[in-house]
Image (cartoon, grey):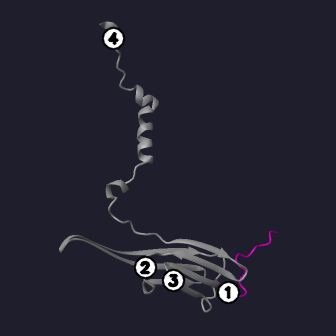
């Protein structure tokens, strides 16, 4: 019977940090999403920005938002897109209301461009959840100035 006993060393795992590896893997894959799978998450504004010699074209996805709830601000080379989301769902079984949920949220996305924008010629169009911005560069602005090193 004495041969079947193992010696316990309580500090062995701490010394090798082997017990922490499992905890690190647990945190890497940890998400709250499965517990809240029936709730809809707030959508994010996803964008594509392309540059030409004349200006920038920005395409931003803002699904489920009305045109009047989208705002675009241009401040020199700083662009801010804001949208107010309103989402309501209702579930009925026969005449009885089983569930009703509402979501009201505010989304915002700001970014800085390399050149100042001529805001008097900037154009914004919104159709089918896509915001398209045409942002012409301000004349005479060549972006970052290169300094001569003496």
On the image, numbered disc 4 is attached to which residue?
4
Q: Which residues are magenta?
A: 136-150
Q: Gap in Å between the C-alphas at discs 2 and 1? A: 30 Å
Q: Is residue 28 left or right of residue 102?
A: right
Neighbourhood count class around disc 3 (C-alpha, 10 Å): few under 14, some 14–19, many 20 upward: few
On the image, numbered disc 3 is attached to which residue?
127
On the image, numbered disc 2 is attached to which residue?
65
Camera sees residue 106: yes
Neighbourhood count class around disc 1 (C-alpha, 10 Å): few under 14, some 14–19, many 20 upward: some
On the image, numbered disc 1 is attached to which residue?
138
Mark 4 vs 1: CB contact within 8 A: no
Q: What secondary structure prevails in the magenta region?
A: loop
Which quadrant would residue 35 be assigned to in this image?
Answer: bottom left
Residue shown at the point (48%, 75%) measured from the top left? 62
Q: Earlier in the sequence, mark 2 or mark 1?
A: 2
Q: Gap in Å between the C-alphas at discs 3 and 4? A: 75 Å
Mark 4 vs 2: CB contact within 8 A: no
120 up-or-down from 28: above or below? below
Residue 83 drawn in magenta: no
Q: Quadrant of the N terminus?
A: top left
Q: Is residue 97 left or right of residue 102?
A: left
Q: Is residue 18 left or right of residue 99?
A: right
Neighbourhood count class around disc 4 (C-alpha, 10 Å): few under 14, some 14–19, many 20 upward: few
Q: Gap in Å between the C-alphas at discs 4 and 1? A: 83 Å
Q: Residue 52, position in %: x, y? A: 71, 78
Q: Earlier in the sequence, mark 3 or mark 4?
A: 4
Q: Gap in Å between the C-alphas at discs 2 and 3? A: 10 Å
């Amino acid at each position: 019977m004495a041969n079947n006993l193992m010696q316990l060393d309580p500090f062995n795992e701490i010394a090798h940090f082997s017990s922490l590896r499992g905890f690190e893997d647990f945190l890497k894959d940890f998400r709250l999403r499965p517990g809240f799978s029936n709730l809809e998450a707030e959508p994010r504004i996803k964008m594509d920005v392309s540059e030409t010699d004349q200006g920038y074209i920005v395409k931003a996805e803002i699904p489920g938002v009305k045109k009047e709830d989208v705002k675009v601000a241009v401040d020199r080379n700083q662009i801010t897109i804001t949208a107010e989301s309103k989402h309501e769902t209702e579930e009925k079984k026969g005449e009885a209301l089983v569930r009703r949920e509402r979501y009201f949220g505010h989304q915002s996305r700001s970014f800085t461009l390399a050149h100042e924008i001529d805001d008097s010629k900037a154009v914004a169009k919104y159709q089918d959840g896509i915001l398209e911005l045409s942002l012409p560069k301000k004349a005479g602005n060549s972006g970052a100035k290169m300094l001569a090193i003496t």
